[in-house]
Amino acid sequence: MNVKDLLSLKDKIVLVTGGAGRYGRPIVEALAEADATIITASRNRAAGEELAAEFRGRGLQVHALQVDQGQHDSVVQLLEDIRGRFGRLDVLVNNAVARPMKSYDSPLSDWEESMRINATGLFDLTRETAELIAASGGGTIINIASMMGLFGPDLSNYEGTDMGIPMPDYFFHKGGMIALTRYLARVLAEKKIRVNCISPGGLYAGQAERFVQNYSRKVPVGRMAEHDDIKGLVVFLASPASAYITGENILIDGGMHA
Ligand SMILES: NC(=O)c1ccc[n+]([C@@H]2O[C@H](COP(=O)([O-])OP(=O)(O)OC[C@H]3O[C@@H](n4cnc5c(N)ncnc54)[C@H](O)[C@@H]3O)[C@@H](O)[C@H]2O)c1
């Protein structure tokens, strides 16, 4: 097969959770530029509609639906909406994340809220969605984890800033997401679903200059991640070009952990 055909997502229907967020935007853009039809779904429908309208203005096929992945009824409704409007689903990108913890000392109720959405909700949405992908003849699931699911925080990055330190729940559920990827790769294989994970490093989003300096000098590539850095990999993992890859976790960190 020609490599351009292997990387094409023509005729594929893709669900991206949290598509209007920071990493969501380049993920949606990449998959749509590769000719897929994208459904972005998050709690904030207005932000999704705005993103979808902007991309449709460029001739890309992007639509917005709503879901609260922490609510089972909302997940079931999303799947019904997708079946009704699109009839099938080929790819799920688990990109949404909730960040209820504000510090290491946050109350346990914030940790519980995080797990309700980022662990229980993630699994619920994935299991329900996998049924629709299986009924559509198989496909792929891509989990967006983080380098923080693999490594502890480098606290020296935060020196000289008022950013505080990263939240503990994030390390727990991102590590869980990487482990769940391997589990699902085996369990969903008989349904012809491949499951892979991307673990990005920090995306530049106007962080404090001191933080950017602290961070960038530890990265062989010499900078924080930019929007284009995730685009090729997400298209590759969604496409037949990665047909022999499942259960894998790929780090995009500019060499920070080389
Ligand atoms: N930003 C980074 O530097 C960075 C680095 C590594 C990994 N990541 C990963 O990338 C992914 C996206 O992160 P981001 O920084 O773009 O996040 P963001 O906060 O910018 O966006 C998160 C999205 O998730 C949605 N969301 C939150 N709770 C939800 C719920 N209950 N149901 C449905 N949608 C919900 C939000 O509406 C939003 O659209 C996450 O999985 C994150 O762990 C981000």
Image (tube, grey):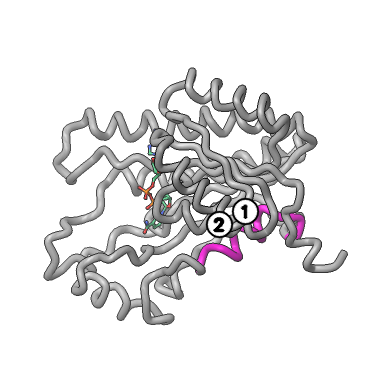
Residue that badge 2 annotates: 29
Viewer-proximal residue, 222 or 74? 74
- Residue in the image at 23% along x and 40% along y: 101
Q: Quick check: 193 left or right of 120?
A: right
Camera-nearest label, 2 or 1: 1
Q: Secondary structure at mark 2?
A: helix
Kindly indicate whether the residue at mark 1 contacts the one at mark 2 (C-beta within 8 angstroms): yes
Residue 178 visible in the displayed image: no
Which span of residues is magenta-colored?
229-241
Viewer-proximal residue, 39 or 146? 39
Residue type at tag 2: Glu
Viewer-proximal residue, 3 or 59? 59
Residue that badge 1 annotates: 60
How crowded pointer 2 is (Cα within 10 Å; few <14, some 14-19, many 20+) is rated as many
Q: Residue furthest top?
A: 73
If you read the primary sequence from the N terminus, does the residue marked by circle 2 or circle 1 appear first? 2
The image quadrant where one finds the C terminus is bottom left
Q: Is residue 56 above or below residue 71?
A: below
Q: Position of residue 121 (x, y in %)?
A: 45, 30
Q: Residue furthest front?
A: 57
Q: Position of residue 70 (x, y in %)?
A: 41, 27
Q: Residue furthest right?
A: 1
Rounded to the nearest whole Å, what is the CA distance between mark 2 and mark 1?
8 Å
The image quadrant where one finds the N terminus is bottom right
